[in-house]
Image: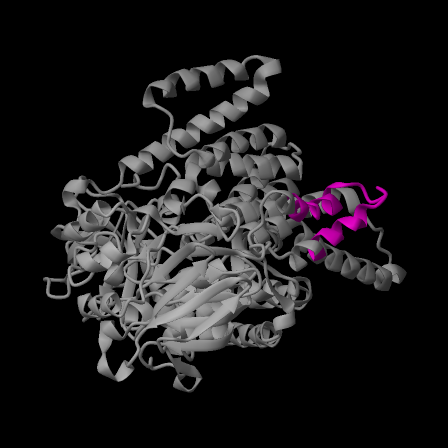
Amino acid sequence: MPAIVLCILSGAYSLEILRQLPPAALFWPAVLLGIGCLCVRRLRIAGACLCGFTCMWFAAQDHLDDRLEPLWQNQSLTIDVYIIDFPVYSSSTLRFVAAPVGRPELPDQLRLTWFEPDDLPQVGQLWQLQVKLRRPRGYVNPHGFDYAGWLFRKGIGATGYVLEDGENRRSFAAPENSISRVRAHFVARVAALLPEDDAAAVLMAIGVGARHKITREQWDRYAATGTSHLMAISGLHIGLAAGSMFLLSWVLLAPFCSRRNIRDLAAVIAIIAAGAYALVSGMAVPAQRAFLMALVVAATLAMRRRISAGAMLGLSALLIFLWDPLAILLPGFKLSFSAVGILIICAQQHFHATAVGSWQIAGTLITHTRRLVYLQFALLAGLFPLTALIFDRVAIAAPLVNLLALPIFNFVTVPLCLFGMLLDGPLQVAGDTFLRWAYATIRLVLMLVDIVAERPALRFAVPALSGVMALVAALPLLHIVLPPAWPGRRLAWIAIVAVLLYKPPAPPPGCLDYAVLDVGQGLAMLLRTSEHVLLFDTGPAFRSGSNTAELVIKPYLQSLGIEKLDKLIVSHADQDHAGGVTALLRSFAIDQVLVGEQVAQSQSLQTQCAAGYRWVWDEISFAILHPRNSSAWEGNNRSCVLRVSVGRHNILLTGDIESPVEKLLVHAAVLQPVDIVLVPHHGSGTSSSQPFIAVLQPSLAIVSAGFGNRWGMPRTEVVRRWEQAGASVLNTATAGAISQRICRSGGAGPVRRSRVDSLKYWHDNVR
């Protein structure tokens, strides 16, 4: 069973590498071929792989067909929606997932944003909203978060926002879902009973899977300490609920039933409890896995059959895949099943039954403690490849923290929370007492988490791994898979040290790597020599409180192993260029900050850009061309203008300068032909004057703009002027991040476009 399931899942995962789905005409022949191969013993593995591939193919095509039709793009629509999950409210912005009601022409699920709402929708409610929708789309950067892929895996067919001046009101045309009502009641009960802090947010999460109160900063702390799995309903919690109800039922039914009947009845009650808890939790993948494993155990008990733990795990994975094929693409599926698989392997290969006599209790406790310690380090080693490749970081302190936190959560916090949930209505006073005790234990655990999270030495950001280093990251698995007596087995731990110390190679001396990042309507460009790093602008900040420094720039720098910026140049103070300054100052050491005009953050660290300022890094020359007299300019026209020279190759970074500054630079004779230019002001009609273009004569003009932005940038006439001058025009909105290596002696390498290099079948076509 496990081998066949692995083949099915391998075939399903292979679809993820495709840039586009195969032609629809091949689907049914592939299905018939897969079934035929399954019927031939020698071809069974190939048949299982092909069946997994076709199942995933069908689900993927179904999700793509459910996306918003272009007809409804950016149209004002009044629709009734059902709130599927708990909305997240932050910085006067509400985000939530909703299902349209009575609108079959729209996708099944929408992800909506509502700025400064008058009222806050709750899970399970029906609302009438006036919205504008668009097809799923996100930034595309090297090693960056694939937002479009995340939406695809979640089954979300459109994103959009609620119109602030629309007729938005709650509708009472349909009753609320009973499960949603239970979840909302528990959240309201905790909110009324306890302070609004981190511990209360975790209690809501482990009670009914309501994670909307856990902030990004909290999740970062939990990830840094390896405790994220504790802060939401996981398979372990479902298993505890099932096991507790099984034992409790056994004790209560013992006086009335035979031993054989007790086992069957207790198993049924345990399954009902596990299913109810999983439903209330929102049925996340770990909860599905635990419930299905409990269901398999109960079925085998009822049929008086024995089944191995590996077969139970494989059958659970297969059932989840058949129910929702795209669920296997979520990190939760990979981590949940990998963790349980590691525990099963450890139990089978490394643990043996221990006889327990009255005089052996102390020795047995020591043995179990050693096993628990071993399991924590085994999970660290076994999950190391996944956490390094998926999350780009590793929590080295996870074994220590979990050794202390797991017993508290498993044997104290979760049971107290469950009792508190069950004791409601007439027994609410007693239930509230249990919830207060659970809250106190969570605060105790969070104190430990905070202590460890504040130790930078225990947090490791893993740079992008590829080729040989990706294989090295997988070596710790040998410690789990190989028998204990295998020689050199412990050397696999060296791979962890090697990965944590690994730094991707910088450009050689005399070479420059540049990347114009995809940050939407804004600008962020990274310039890197062999020993130095410069960031030109920091991208936009948003009304919701987020910014592209956190979403795009920080992950990109970490993927390159960059921990310090030698220079940060903020061309001017507009939010689409300076929006990420605070986040970068908080996350990275920065030697110097140059600004075209003062930005609000950390003014004491800022130095005014001034024409004539020059420096050389690793045979690469840099020169500020503007502003010469900063007091004579303001706003866009005060932008820093930077020229970078790599031998005979030149790059011009222009910020948001407009035609008056372009005219000044042309008349001052400080310009010269360049190879690459950042098109001024995102390609607006106020910039890119004909004389300016004629002097530069670039071969490549790069526009950094947001897809479908409301200003229509870049303007069609501006693009035409650059193209008539012989330049190829690339726009980050359609090309994604644009990068290249230029060397003094070797010339310019190929221009890379992330939307082409990283194209997957769920991305909109490059235009």
Q: Is residue 543 magenta?
A: no
**Front residue of this view, candidates 686 and 494:** 686
Q: Residue 562 appears in which quarter of the rendering?
A: bottom right
Residue 83 image-quadrant placement: bottom left
Q: Main secondary structure of the magenta part?
A: helix
Query: Could you say where residue 336 lies in the image, as x and y percent from the top left?
Result: 56, 48
Q: Quadrant of residue 41?
A: top right
Segment tinted magenta in the rendering? 471-497
| Residue 489 lies in the magenta-colored region | yes
In the picture, the quarter occupied by the C terminus is top left
- Closer to the camera in the image, 241 or 555: 555
Q: What is the x, y in percent for residue 506?
A: 57, 56
Question: In the displayed structure, does residue 13 sit left or right of residue 552?
Answer: right
* Relative image position of residue 729 (x, y in whole percent): 28, 47
Q: Residue furthest bottom?
A: 604
Question: Vertically, is 344 above or below 524?
Answer: above
Residue ID at (67%, 55%): 380
Q: Residue at horizontal 62%, vertical 45%?
A: 470
Residues 284 and 618: in front is 618
Number of numbered callouts drawn:
0
Is residue 710 rendered to the left or right of residue 465? Answer: left
Image quarter where the N terminus lies is top right
Q: Determine whether 317 is above or below 350 in the image.
A: above
Q: Is residue 749 visible?
A: yes
Left or right placement of residue 1 versus residue 749 in this view = right
Coloring basis for residues = one colour
Q: Where residue 16 sits in the image (x, y, percent)?
A: 45, 37
Residue positioned 19% across, 50% down in the render: 721
* Residue 125 visible, this angle: no
Query: Could you say which is closer to the camera, residue 298 or residue 71?
Result: 71
Residue 31 vertical position relative to residue 658 in the rendered view, above or below:
above
